Image: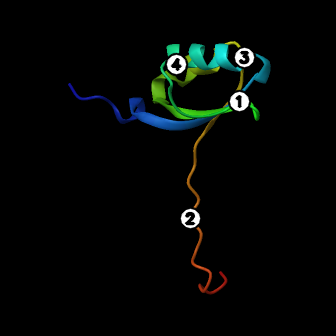
Amino acid sequence: MSESPSSGPVGVILSVDPDRFAEVVEAARGAGLTVTGEQAILGTLSGTIAEDRIPALKAVAGIESVDRDRTVHLPPPDAPIQ
């Protein structure tokens, strides 16, 4: 049986309690997050996680918000204004 598309990994950006940063990073890993970037001074963390694990990630104490990573495509500088 194949895995459903909704359970594939998605990029996320987390806002984390900076006073408990290391503790929260470990708890997020325990919830299934693969960490790709840590910005302790800013209190942010980025990574990938299976779509169906996002609710468990949101429930981790010390995580203030979970936002999906998004890519924005801009036209080239010489493109006409739309």
Name the amino acid, label 3.
Gly
Residue 3: image x %, image y %?
29, 28
Residue 11 percent across, percent down from the top left: 52, 38
Camera-side mark, 1 or 2 = 1
Q: Amino acid at mark 2?
A: His
Residue located at (65% from left, 13% from top): 23
Q: In the image, residue 55 lies at what x, y percent? A: 57, 20
The answer to which of marks 3 and 1 sits earlier in the sequence is 1
Q: Which numbered disc flags the more N-terminal residue, 3 or 4? A: 4
Return the residue at label 1.
40
* Screen quadrant of the N terminus: top left
Give the side of residue 35 with respect to residue 15, left or right: left
- Residue indicated by mark 2: 73
Read off the residue under disc 4: 29
Q: Earlier in the sequence, mark 1 or mark 2?
A: 1
First along the sequence among labels 2 and 4:
4
Q: Which mark is residue 62?
A: 3
Give the distance between the C-alpha atoms of the residues marked 2 and 4, in whole angstroms: 30 Å
**Residues at marks 3 and 4, CA–CA distance in whole angstroms:** 13 Å
Residue at 62% over, 87% down: 80
